[in-house]
Image: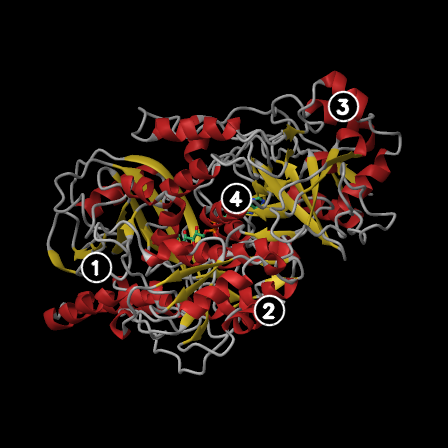
Amino acid sequence: MAGWLTRISAATRPSVRWRSMACSSESWRSFRRESSACCSSAAGSRAVGKAITPGLSGHQNLMHFGELRRLDFLHGRSHRIEAHGLHGQPPGRARRGARRRRRPASGRPLSAPDCGRQHLQHPAERDDGARPGRRDPAAPPLFVRGAALPGERRQAQNARAVDRVPVSAGPRVHRRGRRGAGAPFRRFRTDARARPAERDQRAPAPGPSLLRHLQRLRHPPPVAAAGSPGHPPAGPGRGALGARRARPGVPLHGRAPHLTHGGLTMQSKVPVVIVGGGPVGLSMAILLQRFGVDFVLLERSATTTDHPKARGTYTRTMEIFRQWGIDGQMKRHALPDGSDFFAFCESMTGHEWGRTNPEPNVGHSPCWKIIQSQDTVELELLNHARKSEVGRFLFGHEFLHYDEGAGGIAVTGCKVDTGETVTWHAQYLIAADGAASSVRRQADIEMRGPAALAVMANEFWQADLSQVRDAALCAGWRVYAKNSPYPITTVLNTNGKDRWLSLLPVGREVDERIGERTDDEVVRLARTVAGVPNLDVKVINRSVWRMSRQVAASFRKGRVLLVGDSAHRFPPNGGYGMNSGIQDAHNLAWKLAFVLTGRASARLLDSYERERRPVAESNADFSLHNAARFTQCDEALRSGNPERIGFWIRDSDNHIHSIGQSLGFCYEDGAVIPDGTSRHLMRPRWYEPTDRPGARFPHLWLDLARRHTTLDWFDQAFVLVAGPKADEWMEAARAVSGRNGRVVQAHQLDDSHEKDGLLLGLRGAVLVRPDGHVAFRMPWTPPDPAAELSAVLAKLMD
Ligand SMILES: Cc1cc2nc3c(=O)[nH]c(=O)nc-3n(C[C@H](O)[C@H](O)[C@H](O)COP(=O)(O)OP(=O)(O)OC[C@H]3O[C@@H](n4cnc5c(N)ncnc54)[C@H](O)[C@@H]3O)c2cc1C
């Protein structure tokens, strides 16, 4: 320990505001070198220190000071350094520091100009885990400038709602049975929530060996094998973590809090920890709730995002939302049906060269894709998730590190505002922490594929553009403004009314601009692309992000499983990032639930990567081709050749018409038993229903009112779908169901036609997984269907 970097008051050194932090001798020397080069930093932040080192690139500037968590490069000029919790306290101050953290975070409130910069992020910062559109949890509410914007109240309510999530509440203990039915339901409070008197009783103050404690926080012991001396004691009435294996068929949602470290670090047990509360983490949470599997979700931001990124929620995702009963809520935020087209123009009110056609809905699904912005998707997912009593959502909590042992995985996170650390002993850790996933980095899983195709700047602004043709309907405009500093801009329609997101490339690998766009420049940009010189524009927020085409080398490492952008990142063209991620979660959740409840062996989880990786690769290629289509359009428009322009605009239909990509993916290898038939050619534009093993079972309406569909059969159990004359198969399902805790439901079709994609025949059957994908098909009745079915289930799950 060579030195302590101590917060320097803004009055004495306005340029450097450090939190106190421990650092190694080398880091200390390095800090002194760097800090001597510091000069004034414009962008203020109360929770972080900033130092500016001119002349060095962002990556050159990345260094580590002992327990420093992040050293971020901002705007090509300044650094952001964060230290967490007690790590930053010199020994003599630790207790005072701990007391101080119970009070609201100190520091000067952000001034209005500072707030306007909340979303300005350099790609290097994104790389380091930051996320566009996320508010700094320590920052005051956004939109401090000007009049209230439509939807702000909802955002504020949301922020309040999230605040109401008992972030410091102790883990709840769910007992088996329904609460309403009088089943016992108890809550344990951990120290953070306990009243002071209780806290004193239950958790002794830190002992004199605080340094040892700090050491433990930095290097927590690996999770010991179950029952070993180092293993945390089990909670009331429960076996040790590693030894615990629920009885088959029993929802695993009990846990026991365990306090250690004198109330400074809390420990508790939970089957699953999810890191990341974006659309994928929230979907994973909802799926686990449906299976009754308890979890803790850590999200470092205080709220869901307020930056609209994804806007295309595609058919398969809508089918999943329909199953959860939230497709209607999602549609309330969406543009009208038929809005999935792009216009190519000189300005939104000016000359239009052409537009793509909306994709026709030919009824392959009870649902259809919608254009809805990601902020509202996340909001609805969170609202839905919070209706359940299963699981805890800890917003304002950051994942720090994990340690995996034979019996489980210890996941440590901290409360962003106080630095208080908590360790959860879990069976599995789900990394849903986005493209810059820190879980993935710690697991040392590399990403494969080009990391930087372009660096893009998003600007989200408000303006009344009702004079624009199809302003309520058009998904986006590709604007080629003549004689303008913004030659090619994409404008995305986020609410069909008055909120627009403009996207511009700002570099290949790094942001090559001298500085970020000022508010005035964004207003000029908005007026140019709209073609309205006096347009009244308000800047809402911005972000900078890197376009990549990458898929993780592995989706699983031990007890760590990657989902969503942490496993793959695509160009947004085509709209498959969020959709793929939600479908990852849909693929994984039932497997995880089956493994945790003892209905399947842990090997079932290996099928997750084998199934989802080829889909991720396919979606990545599809997205990349779409990005190239835009480039072709750009060149055609530059050429001015009308035939060339027309050709590439027509070709851009292939960008948007992607029902085959959305529904047609088929798992060739994994938790499926191939039947020897050859795979279907996957064509993004065309979907061919099929009951072939690996494919999504086709949708067929079951009633004239078109309310019930075959898709409604698949939710939490395996389902045998039998042909109209396959009574023996139905009997077999009844006979097998219940063995080893494996429920097999059975449904018999009235009709089975090839034109519907059904090859199971009159006397055959297919076994469909809880995620709606066919696991096994036998288009005839074997001599002993029950034995056949038992063997199939054993092959899939043992
Ligand atoms: C302009 C644009 C348009 C797009 N359009 C579409 C589209 O139309 N359709 C589509 O499907 N996709 C689209 N995408 C992609 C989509 O936005 C992403 O694929 C999606 O957000 C991924 O969701 P995620 O939950 O995996 O990750 P994220 O949304 O990045 O969420 C990750 C979460 O983890 C949190 N986190 C990170 N690190 C930590 C930590 N250490 N501790 C705690 N929390 C942490 C972050 O704060 C964040 O909330 C678009 C993207 C962009 C940029």
Q: Residues within 10 Å of mark 1 (few under 14, many from 20)?
A: some
In primary-sequence order, the first of circles 3 and 1 is 3
Find residue 289 and name its label.
4
Q: CA distance from mark 3 to mark 1?
A: 64 Å
Q: CA distance from mark 1 to mark 4?
A: 32 Å
The amino acid type found where label 1 is placed reads Asn
In primary-sequence order, the first of circles 2 and 1 is 1
Residue 796 in percent (x, y) is at 56, 68
* Disc 3: which residue: 96
Secondary structure under tag 4 reads helix
Residues 707 and 187: in front is 707
Q: Are marks 1 and 4 in contact (CB under 8 Å)?
A: no
In primary-sequence order, the first of circles 2 and 4 is 4
Within the image, what quadrant is residue 556 found in? bottom right
* Disc 2: which residue: 794
Q: Is residue 558 above or below residue 174?
A: below
Residue 384 in percent (x, y) is at 43, 38
Residues 472 and 505: in front is 472
The amino acid type found where label 4 is placed reads Gln
Nearer to us: label 1 or label 4: 4
Q: CA distance from mark 3 to mark 2?
A: 58 Å
Q: CA distance from mark 2 to mark 1?
A: 39 Å
- Horizontal side of 438 relative to 237 (left or right) equals left
The amino acid type found where label 3 is placed reads Arg
Residue drawn at x 58%, y 29% is 182
Q: Which of the image's four quarters has the C terminus?
A: bottom right
